[in-house]
Structure formats: structure tokens, C-alpha cells
Amino acid sequence: MIIGIPKEIKERENRVAIVPDVAKKLIKLGYEVIIETKAGLKAGATDKMYEKVGVTVVDNAADVYAQADIIMKVQKPELNEELGKDELDMMKPGSFLIAFAYPLLNIDFVKKCAEQKINIISMDQIPRTTLAQKMDALSSQSNLAGYKTVIMAADELGKIFPLMMTAAGTVSPAKVVIMGAGVAGLQALGTARRLGAIVEVSDIRPQVKEEVRSLGGRFIEVPTDENMQDSGGYAKEASEEFLRKQKELIFKHITEADIVITTALIPGKKAPVLVTEEMVENMKQGAVIIDMAVEFGGNCELSEFGKRVEKHGVKIIGEPNIPSMVPVHASELYAKNLLNLITHISKDGKIELNFEDEIVRESVITHNGEVTQKRTKELM
């Protein structure tokens, strides 16, 4: 089977699905690999680097789609304005698409894939199990995003992070509040603590309290009898009563913070609003908010997609694709996630799907013209 790597065309996307080192390993597994020219350039990988390991470099995306049995991308296909064609329409019927498809949020896209007999394997649907951990691209990318977010916030803040004793006087440490203790939130916590900040973390799941404390953070706990975590370890959609309690409790913490980082997402749903305009109005002048959920509707009421704005004296950053800001390491980790997945579902250079396998059952969205994933089918 031929694996094809087209250049990413979505705005702000600098990653590439496969790096040269991983391409070499895919070839050893029995696959042929082709790549669109300059596809890896923004991630530090030149055409010569790919050719050196046995990858065939082709002139344009149309050549990739015409030949490939498996398309590996970061973002799901969209209109290629340069060619005047939708990427999906260029794929061969019966071929595989492996990318971040977010099927629960893109039902029409899923339907079209089924109609055109495109088999989707969605990297955002890899289950959070021990076996699937090395394929978990959401976690690998969120980890990098959590780190980069703190660096961005530090750059915007007119203060330093650590406590500093000087002859001229004492500098108090910065106070950081993180909303959400998932992979991104915990990495942000660890990074902010290493820089010397005091960090408080809020999450609807009391199960993460010990993880927060082990990294040196203070856990902001909302008392509740509700079970706030699903079987996959993700946060569930909270009740109106719980969200009201959370906002009341978090108000004081946010208004005293120098930096607020929001990371809260609910699979298949719009991101919950956690930071209201009233909270922003009462924050310190010069404080910084980074809304990591802006791509899915945003956790801050005032954040704007893809923009850095100032409201009520507070800087609000709505950067939608933070992993793409560190494309070298983000591409390396994503490529390894893909390699581990392909290794798991391959035999003799071909994809062979076993739907008794939880990883296959959860991540394969469409197969042979049918929508196969249970959650997506229920939503449809």
C-alpha cells in the first residue's frame, strides 16, 4: 500500500504528518511512501531528507491523492484553493484517511466520507487506555501546547514569574490560575511552577486533585456529588447547578491572578464558558488570559478566534493551534503516534482492521461506505 503525505493547507498549520525518520520505519514495514514537495519544510524537514530515506517526492497534492491508498494528514481535508478542488474529492474510493477529523463536530464531513467510501481513522478518537497510550496524538500535542502556552503568557505579562529577593526589594511571584487539569493543564502547571509561579488549578473532576498537588499546584475544588468524569477519563458536561457553583468559587481566584490559562474541553461539545466578562472586568490591569479552547468556542466570553485583544485592561489571546507554533517537535511526536497506530493495525504492509480491538472500534469512523463508530452513529 502507498502512504501519501500532502502539504497541510489549513491556515496556521505548520506541522507535517510524517517526518523522515518515521517514513524510513514505515518503508521497513512494507509500505511505499510519497510526499508532496515542501510538505515538511515548516517542520524542519526538506525534500532531500525524505528522499534520503527512500520517500518519493511528487510535485503537487493531486499526485499524492491520485496514488495513495492511505492519506496521512494533521488536519482533515478541505478546499485546496491552489488546485481548485476539495482534497476529499481527490481521494480514491476505498482509501484510508488518518487525521484529526473530530467526527462528533463534523457530521456532514463524516457523511460525505461514507458516501465516497473513504475510510476515516480519526486520531482524536484514540481511546485513553494503556495499550493506546503511544498512539494518543491528542495527548502528545496537548502536552506541547501546555508548555508553549505558559511561555506565551510569560512573554505577554509585564512581570517575572519567580519570587526574587534583591537589594532594591522583594519581587512577589506571579500567580497563575489554570482551568482544566487534563494533559495540557498539567503540563502548563509544571512549566509555570518551574518558572517560579504560584499556580492554582480548577477542574470539575475531583479525581485529578492528587496529580495537581504532586506537581506543586493548589487545587480549587468545587464540592459535588456528581460524577464528572466519563469512562475514557475525559470531563463530562457539567450541570447548570455545578457550573454556577464553579463560577462563584473561581471568581476570587481569577480576579487575583496575573495569568489565567483555560484548557477545558468536552468531547463532541462546544467548550464551556468559564471566564465571564464580569470576571475579566475585575481582573488586574495587565493580566493575561490564554484561551486554549478558542478553536471549539472558547472558555472565555471575550476571547476572539485567532486574535490577541485587550478588554478591560486585560490581554486575551485566542490562539487556535498552539502545537503548530512548535512544529518540529509537534510533527515528530505526531508522526510517532501514527507509526505506532499503523504498526498496531498492519500486517505485511497492509492495513487489516479487527473491530474486536477497542482501538480500531473507537478510532475507525467510517469503513466500506458505512459509519461504524458508535458515538458518531448515535449523534447522526
Image: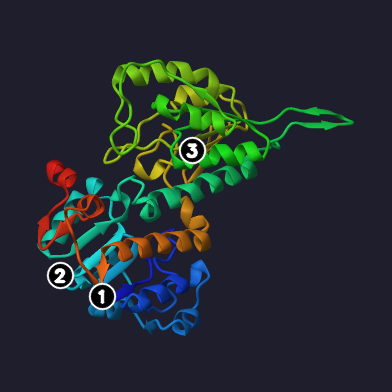
Display coloring: rainbow
Helix, strand or loop at label 1? It is: loop
Give residue 32's quadrant in the image: bottom left
- The answer to whether 22 is drawn above or below residue 252 in the figure is below
Q: Residues within 10 Å of mark 1 (few under 14, many from 20)?
A: few
Residue denoted by label 1: 348
Residue at image position (47%, 53%) is 323
* Separation of marks 3 and 2 at Cα, in angstroms: 39 Å
Q: Nearer the viewer, mark 1 or mark 2?
A: 1
Residue denoted by label 2: 94
Q: Nearer the viewer, mark 3 or mark 1?
A: 1
Whichever of callouts 1 and 2 sits on the residue coming sooner in the sequence is 2
Q: Nearer the viewer, residue 1 or 199?
A: 1
Q: Residues within 10 Å of mark 3 (few under 14, many from 20)?
A: many
- Check disc 2 and give the amino acid type: Gly
Image location (x, y in percent) of residue 26: 36, 73
Image location (x, y in percent) of residue 97: 25, 64
Image location (x, y in percent) of residue 59: 36, 83
* Separation of marks 1 and 2 at Cα, in angstroms: 19 Å
Residue denoted by label 3: 185
**Where the N terminus falls, by quadrant?**
bottom left
- The answer to whether 116 is drawn above or below residue 154 in the figure is below
- Check disc 1 and give the amino acid type: Asp
Q: Using the rendered image of the protein, determine whether residue 340 is visible from the camera's viewpoint.
A: yes
- Check disc 3 and give the amino acid type: Gly
